[in-house]
C-alpha cells in the first residue's frame, strides 16, 4: 500500500468513527426501551416491536428531510450568508414540523384500525396503541430537534448534537426505568412508562439544542420569519424532496417487513423484535465506513482526482469485508449471550431465536458489501440506479416472497430469511454496476491522458 492510499484510508477512519458513534447512540435509545421492558413478557416486547417499526418510519422521514436541509445550510455556511442560514433553518422547521403534525394526526385517528389490521393479538394491539399515543408528542418535538441538529452539522459543530444524545440517553434510562416498574412512589405504567421516558428525554435534548442555538451569533430567527415567503419554501422543498422520496421508498419496505413479521405468533415475533435492534446497531459500524468512503469519493471527484477512486474502492471493499466477517463472529457470540441479556424469556421464544440465529449471523457479511457498493455508486452519480436495485429486490421480489410464505404458513427460517434473500440478490446487481462504473471511470482517465499527450508539444 503506497503512502497516498494509506493516507486516504486513515482519513476514511477519521470520518467514519464519529458517524458510527452518533448512529450507535441514536440506535441505543431503542435498545434502552427494549431491554427495560423485556422482563414484562412477550406481549410487551411484541407491542414495542410493532410500535417501533411504525415510529422508525416517521423518525426516519424526519431525518431524511433534515438531511436535505443540512445540504442547503452547509452551502449557506460556505458562502457565509447569515440570512440564508437563518431562513433555511426556519423553513426546515416549517417543513419538518408540518410533515410531523399532519402525519401524527392521521396516525392517531387511524391507530386503532391500523393496529387491529396488523396484529391478531388484541393485547399486543392495546399496548402498542398506548405507546404510540404518547410517542406522537415525542415525534413533534423530535421534528424540530432534527432540524437543529442539521444546522449544527452543516456549520461544522458536530459535537453539539453528540452532547445532546449523551444527555438524552441516561435521562431516558432513568425516567423509563422509574415509570415502567413504579419506583420511587411513581405508578407502575409498563410500556407507557417507556414512551413517557423517551418523550421527557427528547424534550430535554430539544431544550439543550435550543439553548445552544440561541448562543449562535449568526442566527436571526425572527428576522427570517418576517422575511419568509412561499417561493423560498417551494425552492427549499423542491431540493430536499428527492432525498426524502428515496428514503421513504426504502423505509416503507422495511416497515412493511416488520408489520408482516407481526403476523407470526407472539413468540416468533418477539424473537425477531429482540434481535432486530442489535442487528441495526451492529450495521452502524460497517455503514459508517461505507458513508465515509462515499464522502471521500465525492471529494476525489471535486478535486479532479478520479484516477484514485478505483484503487481506493478496492481497498475499502477489502476492509469492509473484514469488518463484515468480524461482525458475523460478534453475532455468533451474541447468540450465546442472549440468555444472559434476556434471562426471563419464554422457552418458545428461545427456540425461535435458535431457529433464526444462522440467518442473523450471515446477514452482516452480505449487507456490508452491499452497503459499500450502494454508497459508492451514489457518490459516483448513480443514486437512481441504487434506488432501482433496492426497489426491485425489496418490492418486486422480497416482499411478495414474504407474503407468500406467510400465506402458506411457512417455517420461521423461511420468513425471516426474506431479509437474507434480498441482500443476496443485491450482491450481483451492485457488483455488476459498480464494476461497470469503475471501468468507465478508468477508460475516461486513460482517454484524458491520451489527449493530454497528443496536445503536448514535441
Image: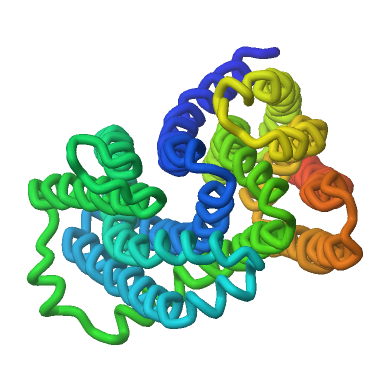
The extreme bottom residue here reads 230
Q: Quadrant of the N terminus?
A: top right
Q: Quadrant of the C terminus?
A: top right
Residue beneath the point at 56% across and 51% down:
43
- Residue 60 shown left or right of residue 217 in the figure: right
Viewer can see residue 447: no
Of 407 and 25, nearer the camera is 407
Residue beneath the point at 69% across and 19% down:
336
Res 73 quadrant in image: bottom left
- Residue 425 shown left or right of residue 152 in the figure: right
* Residue 228 percent coordinates (x, y): 19, 79
Viewer can see residue 133: yes
* Residue 350 percent coordinates (x, y): 71, 33
Residue beneath the point at 64% across and 52% down:
378
* Residue 448 percent coordinates (x, y): 74, 45
- Residue 423 shown left or right of residue 21 in the figure: right
The image shows residue 425, relative to residue 274, as above or below, that is below
Colouring rule applied to residues: rainbow
Residue beneath the point at 35% across and 69% down:
96
* Residue 318 percent coordinates (x, y): 75, 24
- Residue 369 shown left or right of residue 8 in the figure: right
The image shows residue 111, relative to residue 311, as above or below, that is below
Of 284 and 406, nearer the camera is 406
Of 452 and 55, nearer the camera is 55
The image shows residue 162, relative to residue 331, as above or below, that is below
Amino acid at each position: 500500500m503506497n503512502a497516498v492510499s494509506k493516507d486516504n484510508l486513515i482519513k476514511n477512519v477519521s470520518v467514519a468513527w464519529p458517524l458510527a458513534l452518533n448512529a450507535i447512540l441514536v440506535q441505543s435509545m431503542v435498545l434502552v426501551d427494549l431491554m427495560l421492558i423485556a422482563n414484562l413478557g412477550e406481549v410487551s416486547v411484541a407491542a414495542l416491536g410493532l410500535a417501533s417499526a411504525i415510529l422508525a418510519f416517521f423518525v426516519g422521514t424526519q431525518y431524511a428531510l433534515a438531511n436535505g436541509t443540512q445540504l442547503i445550510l452547509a452551502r449557506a455556511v460556505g458562502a457565509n450568508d447569515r440570512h440564508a442560514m437563518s431562513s433555511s433553518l426556519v423553513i426546515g422547521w416549517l417543513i419538518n414540523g408540518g410533515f410531523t403534525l399532519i402525519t401524527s394526526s392521521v396516525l392517531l385517528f387511524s391507530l386503532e384500525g391500523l393496529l387491529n389490521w396488523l396484529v391478531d393479538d388484541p393485547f399486543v394491539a392495546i399496548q402498542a396503541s398506548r405507546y404510540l399515543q404518547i410517542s406522537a408528542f415525542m415525534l413533534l418535538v423530535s421534528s424540530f430537534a432534527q432540524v437543529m441538529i442539521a444546522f449544527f452539522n452543516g456549520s461544522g459543530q458536530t459535537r453539539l448534537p453528540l452532547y445532546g444524545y449523551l444527555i438524552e440517553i441516561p435521562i431516558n434510562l432513568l425516567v423509563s426505568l422509574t415509570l415502567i416498574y413504579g419506583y420511587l412512589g411513581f405508578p407502575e405504567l409498563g410500556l407507557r412508562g417507556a414512551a413517557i421516558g423517551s418523550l421527557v428525554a427528547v424534550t430535554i435534548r430539544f431544550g439543550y439544542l435550543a439553548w445552544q442555538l440561541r448562543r449562535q451569533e449568526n442566527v436571526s430567527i425572527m428576522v427570517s420569519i418576517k422575511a419568509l415567503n412561499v417561493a423560498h419554501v417551494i425552492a427549499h422543498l423542491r431540493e430536499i424532496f428527492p432525498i426524502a422520496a428515496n428514503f421513504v421508498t426504502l423505509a416503507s419496505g422495511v416497515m412493511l417487513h416488520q408489520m408482516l413479521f407481526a403476523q407470526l405468533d407472539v413468540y416468533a415475533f418477539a424473537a425477531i423484535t429482540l434481535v432486530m435492534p442489535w442487528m441495526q446497531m451492529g450495521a452502524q459500524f460497517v455503514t459508517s465506513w461505507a458513508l465515509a468512503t462515499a464522502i471521500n469519493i465525492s471529494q476525489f471527484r471535486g478535486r479532479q482526482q478520479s484516477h484514485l477512486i478505483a484503487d481506493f474502492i478496492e481497498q475499502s471493499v477489502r476492509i469492509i469485508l473484514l469488518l463484515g466477517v468480524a461482525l458475523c463472529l460478534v453475532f455468533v457470540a451474541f447468540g450465546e449471550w442472549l440468555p444472559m441479556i434476556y434471562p426471563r424469556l419464554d422457552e418458545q421464544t428461545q427456540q425461535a431465536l435458535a431457529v433464526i440465529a444462522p440467518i442473523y449471523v450471515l446477514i452482516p457479511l452480505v449487507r456490508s458489501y452491499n452497503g459499500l457498493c450502494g454508497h459508492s455508486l451514489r457518490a459516483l452519480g448513480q443514486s437512481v440506479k441504487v434506488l432501482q436495485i433496492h426497489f426491485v429486490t425489496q418490492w418486486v421480489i422480497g416482499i411478495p416472497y414474504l407474503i407468500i410464505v406467510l400465506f402458506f404458513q411457512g417455517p420461521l427460517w423461511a420468513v425471516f430469511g426474506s431479509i437474507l434473500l434480498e441482500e443476496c440478490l443485491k450482491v450481483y446487481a451492485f457488483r455488476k454496476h459498480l464494476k461497470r462504473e469503475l471501468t468507465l471511470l478508468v477508460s475516461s482517465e486513460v482517454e484524458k491522458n491520451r489527449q493530454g499527450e497528443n496536445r503536448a508539444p514535441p
